[in-house]
Image (cartoon, helix red, strand yellow):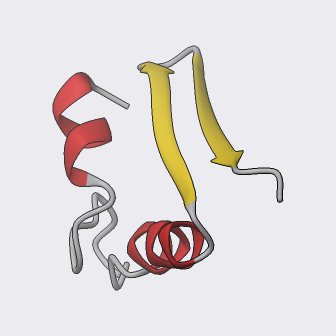
Amino acid sequence: MTEQEARNCMEPFYSTKWNGTGLGMYIAKRYVERNNGTMSIESKKGEYTKIFLKFQLI
């Protein structure tokens, strides 16, 4: 993903696919946040994309 795509991918209805709904990452981010976590993305287009999930230990 480009830097811009990585920033936008967690917004509702954002998709780079012609038939995508753009809800997958948005729903995942909301689930993580509702469980006191954070979600971040590191990506280099054409090489890799890493998604980091961090949760608080109780």
Relative to residue 33, is residue 53 drawn left or right? Answer: right
Q: Position of residue 2 (x, y in %)?
A: 28, 26
Quarter occupied by residue 37: bottom right
Relative to residue 17, is residue 57 drawn left or right? Answer: right
Give the residue at x 34% y 85%: 21
On the rendered image, what quadrant is the C terminus found in?
A: bottom right
On the rendered image, what quadrant is the N terminus found in?
A: top left
Q: Position of residue 7 (x, y in %)?
A: 23, 41
- Given residues 46 and 25, the one toward you in this image is 25
Furthest-right residue in this view:
58
Give the residue at x 48% y 23%: 42
- Given residues 58 and 21, the one toward you in this image is 58
Give the residue at x 38% y 81%: 23
Q: Position of residue 54 (x, y in %)?
A: 66, 43
Instruction: State how many labels appear.
Output: 0
Relative to 56, residue 23 above or below: below
- Given residues 46 and 55, the one toward you in this image is 55
Relative to residue 32, is residue 46 drawn left or right? Answer: left
Give the residue at x 70% y 51%: 55
Relative to 1, residue 39 above or below: below
